[in-house]
Image (spheres, helix red, strand yellow):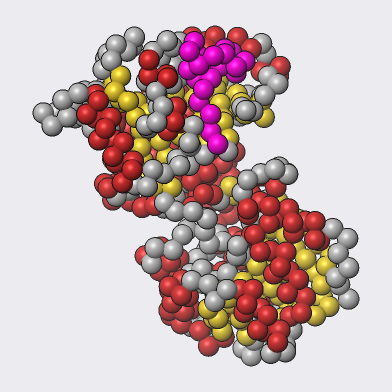
Amino acid sequence: MTRDVVVHPDARVLAEAAAARLLTHLVDVQSHRSPVHVVLTGGTVGIATLAAVAASPVRDAVDWSGVHLWWGDERFLADGDPDRNETQARGALIDALGDALPAANVHAMPARSDDVPTPEASAEAYAAELAAAGSPAFDVLMLGMGPDGHVASLFPGHEALTVTGRPTIGVHGSPKPPPERVSLTYDAIRGAREVWVVAAGSEKAAAVASALRGAPVETTPAAGALGTERTLWLVDVAATEGLGTPSALSTTAAAFPAPERTPADLWGSVDEYFAALVPEDDALSATRRAAADGGLPDIAVTAQQGKLLHLLAQAVGARRILEIGTLGGYSTLWLARALPADGRLTTLEIDPEHARVATDSLAAAGVGELVDLLVGPAAETLDALAADATPPFDLVFIDADKQSIPRYLEQTLALTRPGSVVVVDNVVRGGAVVEAGHPDERVQGVRAMVELLTDHPRYDSTIVQTVGSKGHDGFALLRVRD
């Protein structure tokens, strides 16, 4: 399996970049799946990464109530022992999140106690907790790596390497203190969607080289840490000394040292700087809060993006607007405010609870009379609108399931006129659209859209990439041909 390798200048930058990558990934995953399951790691860089997450201005973009935290291994010590990975993680991140992260979402490996007297008892209890959670496929499983190439508590030549048929194991005789530990097995590790191995320092260089060159797991256990969708190695320059210069890494996606400031941090800061141009008034803020209070996923457009839709609607003189994907009504409010007094906005939402939250917010914002909110599958509603000979829309905003974009675009032709403008959101997917074999159906939906639009007789189109507090994405801008 291919391993992607990203090289950073030093351990500090590595930790900050890993934190930014994790936050961006969590936001992206939560846009289509909840809950999200993450496995944390200890070690110097692992804990520094958690501290960087806690300090990041992007931290609150994650809906932590929908995140479950697990551990790849644990030192079998008493609860609260400062050497436990859990104790260090609480000090670095979990305590800082406070009530945003429910206590029930923190799944620590049971500590040594009278009720849990052995590593085996702890491993069995943790396996039971995993089963009770539905044996989740971890969305991200982070692993540190020792100089000997061990990951979790799977050490070279140790019998734990060969254990199958269960997700956890008690470990005795660890060459690294303390000798008793609890660990996930390869079965659990290899069931994760993405596995991230984090390693820094020249003392790790030999093991990094060994693992990336495909050494047997018996001698370099990290070589066996593989994800079902992606295996990512996040390392610093010192850890690549055994592989030659960074530019010589054949498996590297970004082989050159990253800048001192991570891109995600910079993008978020730029959004904050320009926020003065797009202040949220009380109604917009209340709409966003109502969506959060209603448990809706935090995937609405940003204020900057909402204002862009508003300006586009005004620029084309839109009197009739169609929106596919209402969510909590935040983008709907921006669009409705661009309408003239006799304008109308039709918005489609499949989830009745989302529709209820949006209806209340739009009414409170004073635009409820301009909006028709239709509940049901969008494809069926679009067919019904066409069958009813609905007057054409001047602007269409599509922000719904990406798998259905090609169908929505074909249906939209029956509901627009020459000169109508269509905007399709979230079409870059962090750059994943360039991967023909990507397993995400949303990515494949966008790729099908591109194929549809290539030389399309009725649509003139372009794609605009964007970066910001929500990461790397973009939108399609289309005009119905005359």
Furthest-front residue in view?
Answer: 165
Question: What stretch of residues is rendered in magenta?
Answer: 209-228
Relative to 301, residue 71 above or below: above
Give residue 407's position: percent from left, percent from top.
Answer: 71, 68
Residue visible at 46% across and 82% down in the picture: 363
Residue visible at 44% across and 27% down in the picture: 186
Per the picture, the main secondary structure of the magenta-coloured stretch is loop
Relative to 69, residue 287 above or below: below
214 is within the stretch colored magenta: yes
Q: Nearer the viewer, residue 462 or 105?
A: 105
Relative to 92, residue 304 above or below: below
Furthest-left residue in view?
Answer: 114
Give residue 335's position: percent from left, percent from top.
Answer: 61, 74
426 is within the stretch colored magenta: no
Image quadrant in which the C terminus is located = bottom right
Q: Is residue 11 left or right of residue 415?
A: left
Q: Is residue 307 left or right of residue 44?
A: right
Residue visible at 60% across and 65% down in the picture: 400
Q: Is residue 468 left or right of residue 43?
A: right
Give residue 450's position: percent from left, percent from top.
Answer: 77, 56
The total number of labels drawn is: 0
* Residue 339 position by quadrant: bottom right
Give residue 265's position: percent from left, percent from top.
Answer: 54, 40
